[in-house]
Amino acid sequence: MSSPYIRRMPVHGAVEIGGTRTSFGVGSSPDDLAPRSISTGGPDDTLGEVVAFLVEVEPDGVGIASFGPLDLAAGRIRVTPKPGWSGTDLLRPLRTALDVPIGLDTDVNGAALGEARWGAGRGLGSFAYVTVGTGIGGGAMIGGDPLHGLGHPEMGHVTVRRHPEDRCPGVCPLHGDCLEGLASGPAVAARAGKPAQELTGADLRTAVDMEAFYLAQLVRDLVYVLAPERVIVGGGVAWLPGLLDLVNERLDDELAGYPGLAAHEAGFVVPPGLGHLSGMAGGLILAERAVASMSSG
């Protein structure tokens, strides 16, 4: 029988809300996370399942890493193509049910936080994290913190040159043929008539070639704007065989020898060290920071 005077170790709740799947769990590191995953349906049903789980496990704090765009100050999702989610208050359902500190950031900033502590960003002063899946998003870690300004970065909506053989008009409902419109999972599916994960043979080679063409342009822009020490690329599409190797090769062409740093020549673009747990790991850190902020305040 445990003594009532022994204080239990803090256990934080982590929530990752993606455009396709939502995951949630509790723990103190990726090693003891056993996340549950559900389809991201409507906000009421999705957040209801999350809240029911968290109420049962009673965490010390909760961290939410969510798709956006987000109004971080208000805790809301701004206008989004995800049906039914525009204007959703992500914090109110949790605050109503739980009396614990809650931290919130974008899914990519959350993943960057996780990779900085436990994954492919360990020991680096700066790096960028990009996810390529249902949408494309990116976050940047500068001096141990995610980059924020007037809102948060929207790397998936930059303009890129079209691949000379690409006939896809672009699937982004806002910009058409921005990076997300040409290189997200739905863009790959629109070209091939099937999801990226089902492609084989010539269809797979074409998809990898076009993805590398577009993603190398994004990485080039990140090199010139942010000067990161590494770029980590995750998400369902990023796991296409040979894709990141080809992005590294194409980046050499995109940079054209400028600025001429050896670090850009090989292995500059890498997969997440935590695999699919990057965002959840970041949720733990967001919870940890929220608890620490509440304690110091």
Image (cartoon, rainbow, N blue to C red):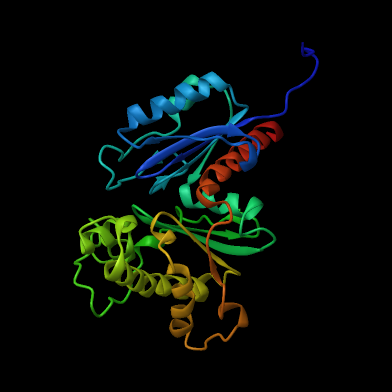
Q: Tell me the residue at 44%/85% (across/down).
A: 253
* Quarter of the rendering containing residue 216: bottom left
Looking at the picture, how far across and down is residue 250, in whole percent? 43, 79
Query: Viewer-proximal residue, 27 or 156?
Result: 27
Residue 213 image point, x, y percent: 36, 75
Residue lying at the far front in this picture: please name it. Answer: 201
- Residue found at x 33% / y 71%: 205
Query: Is 21 placed above or below 273 here?
Result: above
Picture quarter with the N terminus: top right
The image quadrant that residue 170 belongs to is: bottom left
Location of residue 115 by image quarter: bottom right
> Is 225 situated above or below 115?
below
Horizontally, is 225 left or right of 167 in the view?
right
Q: Is residue 168 left or right of residue 131?
A: left
The answer to which of 132 and 74 lies nearer the viewer is: 132
Name the residue at the bottom extreme.
257
Q: Residue, x 49% and y 75% (percent of image)?
A: 248
Q: Is residue 191 above or below residue 297?
A: below
For the question of whether residue 188 can be seen, the reply is: yes
Q: Position of residue 149 (x, y in %)?
A: 50, 56
> Can residue 75 be seen?
no
Residue drawn at the location 42% of the way across and 34% of the way down:
90
The total number of labels drawn is 0
Q: Quadrant of the C terminus?
A: top right
